[in-house]
Structures are given as structure tokens and as C-alpha cells.
Image: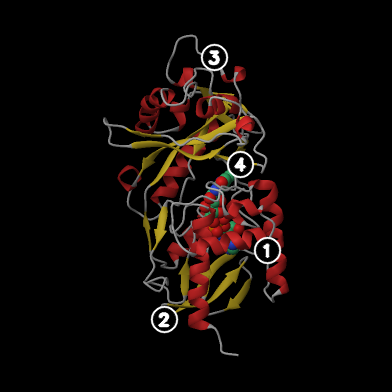
């Protein structure tokens, strides 16, 4: 889910919304249509494509790259950088091949922990940054539709309803919010390491699974986990490992109903509720795989959100842990011309470098970096 062709976005909800505004975003959407996205993404307020369409779009992009003379290499991991006089002169592939180059555009995503470590060792400037952690919550889509529309969405010509929730906790000063809400989707296993459980959400274009899921997360920062650039990774890993152990050490996810989480008497167990995570869930106490400063905020946020969306905090609603990969836990330094201040010719970009938070903003950051490099380095014909 986090790696491979198309990156983390291939198996996703394919929401193409972004808080970034930039004229090139429309151009990017037009490319998506050219490669198979529905034309409606050019004018819809909240466009989405779904995993089924993304997979074929990404393949079509790869074929165009090859047609235009590019090379795409599967199973090829950059395992080291060769640097001379603080400037890149080459990269190592899979520990046994060297490619000489003085320019590298690097968009490794937010889960390439081994690559993060290697880049840190090679003096690529990076600092710890805030992100958010929490759980996935699942509802019958009909509950969300009823609360948001009051009637069947199809009677209004609409698709499965979405929501966006925020709670500012006065007691701690932290904010809880819903993130990556996937109407009519499913919760997916998104671990990228053995011994860790991570949840996320995805959907197909039709968004017709009947299940609404969303991350509900609380902001965390270096004040919680430390200022070393890789401290955020260690913090994510700690909770992912706890979740793995709680789930039975076989990639089942720990899960709990809202009623159990809030300590209500006679709360239903997850076996009686809706959940979609595969290979399965184990009824646990989610307080055991999240820090107390996160669970306490979620405990106050849930009833608050239940007053906004009727049924949101129903005692039978299932929550699955842990959602730790909401954004990169570090940011790589960049000069005004987007190059690393410590390694000349090395251009960190996209979500893994801390400059994007979704498909569109990552695409924009990559496109802008590539255009800049083309202007700077392209040889005249
Ligand atoms: C399940 C899921 C659902 C999501 N849903 C949405 C959504 O609906 N809408 C949205 O906007 N965003 C969504 N996101 C987030 C979105 O996918 C990311 O923001 C986006 O993909 C980031 O793009 P990127 O190119 O920066 O990195 P990535 O997409 O993570 O790509 C990084 C690439 O680098 C490769 N790589 C890593 N290390 C190396 C190395 N050492 N050598 C060579 N290659 C390497 C990886 O294999 C991968 O292909 C979702 C993410 C997930 C996991």
C-alpha cells in the first residue's frame, strides 16, 4: 500500500482535494483525465477517482514515460548516495549498482524509513516535524448519509456522504480531527514493516461498499517525541508495534467499540459491529496502543462529534488501530531553488520530504521541482 508503482496514492480513496491553490493543479487534473480519470474531476467540488481507476491510470502514465524515452525500473531501491565535496555524484541501486549523476529528484514518500536513515547518514538536512496519530472509525454509510442529507443520496443525485470534523481540546490545547474520510470504502492494512500494524482507508470509484471510514487523529509534535530528525519515526514505530502485539502478532488489528473505549457499561463488542479490516480484528483496549494524551482527547472529541453527526459516537461503532502515517514525521531542508542546502544536486520533494499532504499537493510539488530542474539543467537541442 505504501510503496511501488504509483506510490501510496495507488491504493487509496483517490480524493483529489487539496488545500493548496495553484494554477498548475488544473493542468495536473487534465493529465489525470488523459490517463483515464473521469472528466468530472475537472469541475467537481470534491473530485475522487478510487483505487480501481487509479491503478490503470498509473499504468498508462508509465507507458507514456517509456514511449517518450524514459526508463521505469521496478524492484530498484536507492540504497546509498555518492557525494563528493558536498555535491551528489551518483546513487547506489539495491546495494550493488552505481548510477553516476549530478542531479537527483527524490520523492520517496513518508514511509521509506530505511531511506530516511540512509539520507540522514549522508547528511541530507532534515528536522522533526509534527504529524497526527489515532485510529480509524467505521460507520454504516447509511448513518452518515441520513445525518448529512436526511434522505437517500441517490434521490438527490448525490453519492455517499462525506464529513469533516474538528475538536479543539481546551484541557490540553490539542486538536482532534477526522482525516482521509473514505465514503463507501474500506479500512486497509498499511503496515510497511514486519512487527507493526498500521491502518488507513481506501475506496473504489463507485464508493458503494456501504461502509464509511475515516481516521480520527490528534496532533503530536517533537515536544512529545524528541527533536532528533528520526524521533518521529521511532514514535510511530513504538505504537505500531504495540498494536501488532495487541492484535496477536499476525497483522490482525486491535479494535474496540466506542462504548468500550468510553468505558460505558454493557458496551457491545466489535464482533457485533461493522468492520472491514482484513485479515481481521481483535477486540482490545485501544488505550494500550496509543499515548494517553491522544486517547484522552479522543474520549472528549467523540461525544462532541456525536452531537454533530447523529450516531457518530454510537456505542457499537468500531474503531481500529493504529493510524500513524498521516503525514511525514520529518521535513528535509530545501533552498529557494528546492535543492538540499547540505547536498548539492539533491532535490527532496513530495510528501516524504514534508512538502505535500496528499495526491494533488505531491503531484504539484513533483511537477514544480521537475520543471525547475528542466529549466536549469536541460541541454539545448
Ligand atoms: C491507503 C492510503 C489512502 C490514501 N488516500 C488518499 C486520498 O484519498 N487522497 C489523497 O490526496 N491522498 C491520499 N493518501 C496520501 C497520498 O497517497 C500521498 O500523499 C501521496 O501518494 C504522496 O505522494 P509522493 O509521491 O510524495 O509519495 P509516495 O506516493 O509515497 O511515493 C513514494 C515512492 O517512492 C518509492 N521509494 C521509496 N523509497 C525508495 C528508494 N529508496 N528508492 C526508490 N524508490 C523508493 C516508493 O516505492 C513509492 O513508489 C493516501 C495514502 C494511503 C496510504
Residue 111 seen by the camera: no
Residue that numbered label 4 is attached to: 202
Q: Position of residue 269 (x, y in %)?
A: 56, 17
The residue under the point 36% across, 42% down is 220
Instruction: Report, in whole angstroms, how far the alpha carbon at label 3 lies from the one at label 2.
Output: 63 Å
Q: How many marks?
A: 4
Q: Residue 268: which numbered mark, if any?
A: 3
Mark 1 secondary-structure assignment:
helix
Q: Residue furthest top?
A: 266
Residue position for label 2: 85
Mark 2 or 1: in front is 1
Please tell me in which quadrant of the rendered image residue 120 appears.
bottom left
N-terminal-most mark, 4 or 3: 4
**Which quadrant contains ligand 1?**
bottom right
Q: Position of residue 362 (x, y in %)?
A: 51, 58
Residue 308 to residue 346: above or below: above
Cβ atoms at labels 3 and 2 below 8 Å apart:
no
**Element at badge 2?**
loop
Under 8 Å from ligand 1: the CB of mark 3? no
Amino acid at each position: 500500500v505504501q510503496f511501488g508503482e504509483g506510490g501510496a496514492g495507488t491504493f487509496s480513496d483517490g480524493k483529489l482535494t487539496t488545500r493548496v491553490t495553484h494554477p498548475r493543479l488544473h493542468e495536473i487534473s487534465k493529465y489525470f483525465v488523459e490517463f483515464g480519470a473521469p472528466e468530472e474531476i475537472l469541475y467537481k467540488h470534491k473530485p475522487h477517482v478510487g483505487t480501481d481507476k487509479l491503478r490503470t491510470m498509473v499504468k498508462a502514465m508509465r507507458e507514456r514515460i517509456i514511449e517518450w524515452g524514459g526508463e521505469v525500473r521496478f524492484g530498484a531501491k536507492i540504497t546509498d548516495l555518492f557525494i563528493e565535496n558536498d555535491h551528489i555524484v551518483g546513487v547506489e541501486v539495491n546495494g550493488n549498482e552505481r548510477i553516476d549523476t549530478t542531479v537527483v529528484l527524490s520523492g520517496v514518500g513518508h514511509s521509506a524509513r530505511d531511506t530516511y536513515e540512509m539520507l540522514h547518514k549522508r547528511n541530507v538536512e532534515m528536522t522533526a516535524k509534527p504529524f497526527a496519530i489515532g485510529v480509524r472509525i467505521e460507520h454504516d454509510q447509511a448513518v452518515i448519509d441520513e445525518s448529512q442529507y436526511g434522505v437517500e443520496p441517490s434521490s438527490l443525485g448525490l453519492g455517499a456522504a462525506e464529513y469533516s470534523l474538528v475538536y479543539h481540546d481546551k484541557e490540553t490545547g490539542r486538536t482532534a480531527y477526522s482525516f482521509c474520510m473514505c465514503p463507501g470504502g474500506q479500512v486497509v492494512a498499511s503496515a510497511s514493516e514486519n512487527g507493526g500494524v498500521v491502518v488507513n482507508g481506501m475506496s473504489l470509484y463507485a464508493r458503494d461498499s456501504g461502509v464509511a471510514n475515516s481516521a480520527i487523529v490528534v496532533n503530536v509534535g517533537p515536544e512529545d517525541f524528541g527533536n532528533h530528525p528520526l524521533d518521529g519515526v521511532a514514535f510511530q514505530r513504538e505504537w505500531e508495534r504495540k498494536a501488532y502485539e495487541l492484535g496477536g502478532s499476525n497483522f490482525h488489528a486491535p479494535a474496540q467499540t466506542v462504548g468500550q473505549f468510553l468505558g460505558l457499561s454493557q458496551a457491545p463488542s466489535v464482533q457485533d459491529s461493522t468492520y472491514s479490516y482484513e485479515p481481521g480484528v481483535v477486540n482490545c483496549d485501544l488505550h494500550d496502543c496509543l499515548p494517553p494524551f491522544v486517547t484522552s482527547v479522543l474520549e472528549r472529541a467523540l461525544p462532541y462529534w456525536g452531537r454533530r453527526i447523529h450516531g457518530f459516537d454510537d456505542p457499537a461503532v468500531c474503531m481500529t488501530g493504529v493510524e500513524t502515517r498521516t503525514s511525514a514525521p520529518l521535513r528535509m531542508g530545501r533552498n529557494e531553488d528546492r535543492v538540499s542546502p547540505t547536498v548539492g544536486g539533491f532535490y527532496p520533494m513530495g510528501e516524504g520530504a514534508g512538502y505535500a499532504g496528499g495526491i494533488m499537493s505531491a503531484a504539484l510539488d513533483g511537477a514544480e521541482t521537475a520543471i525547475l530542474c528542466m529549466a536549469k539543467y536541460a541541454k539545448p537541442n
